[in-house]
Image (cartoon, rainbow, N blue to C red):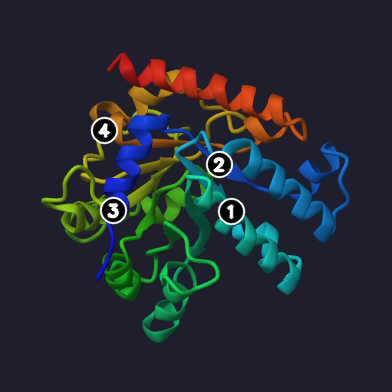
Amino acid sequence: MSGEPFGARLRRAMDERGPLCVGIDPHASLLAEWGLNDDVAGLERFSRTVVEAMADRVAVLKPQSAFFERFGSRGIRVLEKSVEEARAAGALVVTDAKRGDIGSTMAAYAETFLHKDSPLFSDALTVSPYLGYGSLSPAVALARESGTGLFVLALTSNPEGGEVQHAVRSDGRTVAATMLAHLAAENEGERPLGSFGAVVGATLGDLSSYDLDINGPLLAPGIGAQGATAADLPAVFGSAVHNVVPNVSRGVLRHGPDTAALRSAASRFAEEIGAAVAAV
């Protein structure tokens, strides 16, 4: 039997802690900025520091799996520990792995991150639907069973994404709009929030031509180093802004390794986001 759905847990966390999501992105340049070596010891120190600084106060932590995977099995072990410790401290963990495949392979990816007995068990997982939305069915089914969630790539902030996401289908609807419609169907009737979210870049400007009201969360990368600000959120997301989970990575992480400085940076972003959302 599944526990409380991810959407309900996320809504409560956002209401209690604010909607800020902080990325855990230990890429080589950030390790160097922190005075750490680009090795497993540096990775472990970086990740532990971010978790200790953030997990008891932000709604969501989002480790980027690739930066752990590049160190092989030892890096994966650091990721496992980071996920476990972050969840134990009260943060919801969205593992950013952008998995996408078909059939039993997609099922295996889902089990890696969404099965309750997996060492990498997370509250939600980012997935790619560009083998067709139906290819995500094993992940959708397991998420429902385990009370976890998915964030599906829909309108991403990278400029290359448009050649696929803005492509127009034979029915006159763009690929991105099709993905949003699928998610709205998954979340229909869920209260207070569905568990199947979309990734929508905060840098994309006016998205009024898209129906972002999917009754699910909208994970919004791009604030900080990529150029978007908290003040941009209402214009980008309109009435759906109250379901936005704004992600900040480098904008917070560059203030490390000092724990107090990391917390101060996160608090500033949280206050700016809260003020922008409250004005809508």
Distance between mark 3 and mark 2 Cα atoms: 21 Å
Going from the N terminus, do you reach mark 1 or mark 3 first? 1
Image height check: is 147 above or below 255? below
Distance between mark 2 and mark 4 Cα atoms: 26 Å
Q: Nearer the viewer, residue 202 or 35?
A: 35
Going from the N terminus, do you reach mark 3 or mark 2 first? 2
Does residue 134 show up? no
Callout 3–callout 2 Cβ contact below 8 Å: no
Please give the residue where the numbered disc 2 appears in the rendered image.
55
Q: Nearer the viewer, residue 148 or 250?
A: 148
Closest to the camera, between mark 3 and mark 4, is: 3
Is residue 193 found left or right of 12 in the rendered image?
Answer: left
Callout 2–callout 1 Cβ contact below 8 Å: yes
Residue 240 - label: 4
Distance between mark 2 and mark 1 Cα atoms: 8 Å
Q: Quadrant of residue 29?
A: top right
Is residue 5 found left or right of 42 in the rendered image?
Answer: left
Is residue 279 found left or right of 224 in the rendered image?
Answer: left
Q: Label 4: how many residues lie within 10 Å, few (<14), some (14-19) or many (20+)?
A: many
Going from the N terminus, do you reach mark 4 or mark 1 first? 1
Residue at image location 50% in from the left, 52% down from the top: 87
Please give the residue where the numbered disc 1 appears in the rendered image.
85
